[in-house]
Image (cartoon, grey):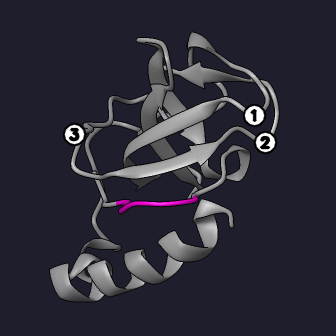
C-alpha cells in the first residue's frame, strides 16, 4: 500500500487536534520555497520497498538537490513524513544496508510495516 492513503487520514486528524486550520490565512514576510529546510526526526518504525529507482532529496521536493539513489526493490526505513510545499506526502528515511538518507516522495515507496509519524 502506498503511504499517501494512510498519511491523508493521519494528517487530517493531526490538523484537527493541533488547530492547523487556524493559520491558513496568515502571511509571511518572505516567500516560501519548495527547498526550504524541513525538520525530521527518527520517530517511526516504518519499512517499505522502492517502487523504482529514484534519487533521495535534501528536502521534500523534486527540485531539491540529490543526496543519493535508491534502486528498485531496495528496502527503505521510514523515519517520519511531511506534506511538502505542494501538498504531497514525502518521507524521510534511510536505504537499507547503507547510510544513504534523504527525502523520498510517498508515491515512490511502499509502506509494509511499522509506524509512520509526522516529523
Q: Main secondary structure of the magenta part?
A: loop
Q: Which residue occupies 50% across, 32% down? A: 103
Structural crowding at the residue carrying mark 1, measured as other residues with C-alpha within 10 Å and reported as few (<14), some (14–19) or many (≥20): some
Q: Which residue occupies 49% across, 17% down? A: 97
Q: In which quadrant of the rendered view does residue 111 lie?
A: bottom right
Q: In the rendered structure, find residue 41 and report the number of the disc placed on it.
A: 3
Please provide percent x and percent y for residue 12.
41, 83
From the image, state whether disc 1 or disc 2 is nearer to you: 1
Where are the magenta residues, as a range? Answer: 112-116
Q: Which residue occupies 47% across, 33% down? A: 33
Give the mark, 1 or 2, whose residue is nearer the N terminus. 2
Q: In the picture provided, is 59 more to the left or to the right than 44? A: right
Given contact means CB atoms under 8 Å apart, are the residues at marks 3 and 1 in contact?
Answer: no
Instruction: State whether residue 27 is above or below residue 56.
Output: below
Residue that label 2 marks = 51
Residue that label 1 marks = 73
Give the mark, 2 or 3, whose residue is nearer the N terminus. 3
Amino acid at each position: 500500500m502506498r503511504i499517501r492513503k494512510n498519511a491523508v487520514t493521519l494528517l487530517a486528524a493531526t490538523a484537527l487536534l493541533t488547530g492547523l486550520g487556524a493559520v491558513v490565512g496568515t502571511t509571511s514576510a518572505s516567500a516560501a520555497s519548495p527547498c526550504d529546510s524541513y525538520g525530521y526526526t527518527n520517530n517511526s518504525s516504518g519499512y517499505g520497498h522502492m517502487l523504482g529507482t529514484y534519487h533521495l532529496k535534501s528536502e521534500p521536493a523534486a527540485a531539491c538537490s540529490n543526496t543519493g539513489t535508491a534502486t528498485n526493490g531496495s528496502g527503505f526505513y521510514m523515519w517520519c513524513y511531511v506534506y511538502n510545499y505542494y501538498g504531497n506526502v514525502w518521507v524521510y528515511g534511510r536505504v537499507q544496508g547503507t547510510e544513504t538518507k534523504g527525502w523520498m516522495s510517498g508515491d515512490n515507496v511502499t509502506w509494509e510495516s511499522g509506524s509512520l509519524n509526522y516529523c
